[in-house]
Amino acid sequence: MLTLNCTNADSMIIGEEHGLNISQEFDNYSDKIADIIKSLNQRKDKLGEGLQWMNLGYNEETVWYVKEFASMVEGRFENIVVLGIGGSALGGLAITEALLKPYWNFLTLEQRNNLPRIFFLDNIDPDSINGLLEVLDLKKTLVNVITKSGDTAETMSQYMILKDLMEKELGDEYRKNIVVTTDKKMGILRQLADQEGYKIFYVPDDVGGRFSVFSSVGLVPFALVGLDIDKIMNGVKDMDLELKNTNIHQNKAAQGALIQYLMDKKGKDISVLMPYSSRLKHIPDWYIQMISESLGKAYNRNGEEVHTGITPIKAIGATDQHSQMQLYNEGPNNKLITFIRVKEFDTTLEIPKIFEYTGIGYLGGKTVNDLINAEADSIKVSLSDYKRPTITITIDRIDEYHIAQLLYLLEVQTAITGELYNIDTFNQPSVEQAKNYMYALMGRAGYEGSAESIQNKLAQV
Ligand code: PA5
């Protein structure tokens, strides 16, 4: 179903300087890993640990409410616009891009089985917001405002713009075109949503943005565009059960985490995630946020200054073979590259047998499927020739079940890596600090004190 192959990170293949004696290391760390897995599973129900995302696969009530809402609005909207940033957008973007038919927003209504297009507005670039507004018919648009804190400036400013325009165009009816996903109690959006009478979904307590994709944060948009959220949840649950195994030899998340951690100790503190599929092109974006915010920490749990972190990089196969691969092969040997491979693509595309007597004749009669697989295989071999460590995750196919398995695996892997570093994986003090600086600069009440000092610093930098 989902396999993890670490052979090309092993010293047997790439030598001792750059590889690990993997089976030896698994044995060395087996007790520590078992303790970590036990501890994560014991702490996951305790509020304040940041681990409630490990329970999301079992949240049948939310799935029921989301499906009910999706069926209530079925056929009413041509467009879904998600307003959100960071963890409130990246998982949704990654999964819809993977699971919807390619070029979904360009398909006709009929080709989309009467399902809406979906747009993620995850930036505050005025040109792109204005551009999107030009193509939307607001009467046929459902806006899903997603912000856990309920006051993130980027998301709230987009909401204010959309709400204002929709009210002007739709009158009082605009309320039916807005659905909110936010914290149960906290935040300005929570209060506004009540006052306005919007439909509200909650981000469960103790689920941080970057671990929220399987909460209503992801499920609402997924259900609205017709994805099977039961299958998504089954993927999460089955993977969760598998990853409860405390034996590192049978736990892929633990294996991935330990290899990443030990490679960092060997000076390979860059992690490249490289899916061989364009449909998976936003999964590295989601992964980048998760790794950056989870593992980039100044202090460990003992209060010691550690400055941990792995620098994540996005690459897409085969495209980036023609962009980044030269560096990966011949540049500094400071990366661990994780390939994501797909066993069976949904379709097969044959290359016609033309130009037979030319240099490209060998391609004729083969399939594009053969070609992308051959490209991935050849890169794996060439990287190992250069003694570059790689790992390969293979999923059977791109569907709800397997994509959910893949993302959940990477979440648990990140949590275990954080435990190996002994850091708080689930806080993000620097993200909060940047938000506070921006509030001060934009004149938010309560931040006047820091505004002056930030202005002074700004004059110097
Ligand atoms: O992972 C996180 O916690 C952050 O990246 C948040 O998702 C991001 O800052 C958006 O926050 P919010 O959902 O509160 O608008």
Image (cartoon, rainbow, N blue to C red):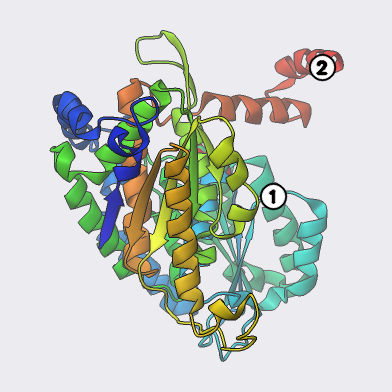
Distance, label 1 to label 2, CA atoms, is: 25 Å
Which one is nearer the viewer's eye here, 47 or 292?
292
Instruction: Identify the secondary structure beneath mark 2.
Output: loop
Crowding at mark 2 (Cα within 10 Å: few <14, some 14-19, many 20+): few
Q: What x and y, as percent, mark residue 50?
A: 35, 34
Instruction: Identify the secondary structure beneath mark 1.
Output: loop
Q: Is residue 197 above or below residue 250?
A: below
Q: Is residue 120 above or below residue 149?
A: below
Q: What x and y, as percent, mark residue 321?
A: 58, 54
Three-letter residue code for mark 2: Val
Identify the residue at the far bottom of this view: 110
Q: Which mark is residue 123?
A: 1
Q: Is the shortest distance between ligand 1 and the CB of mark 1 under 8 Å? A: no
Q: Is residue 136 above or below residue 451?
A: below
The quadrant in which the C terminus is found is top right
Three-letter residue code for mark 1: Asn
Which one is nearer the viewer's eye here, 1 or 461?
1
- Point 81% across, 61% down: residue: 130
Q: Splitting the image into 4 quarters, where does residue 390 fall?
A: top left
- Point 24% across, 54% down: residue: 239
Q: On the picture, is 374 further left or further right than 157?
A: left
Q: Earlier in the sequence, mark 1 or mark 2?
A: 1
Q: What x and y, as percent, mark residue 242?
A: 18, 50
- Point 62% across, 41% down: residue: 152
Q: What x and y, as percent, mark residue 356?
A: 60, 86
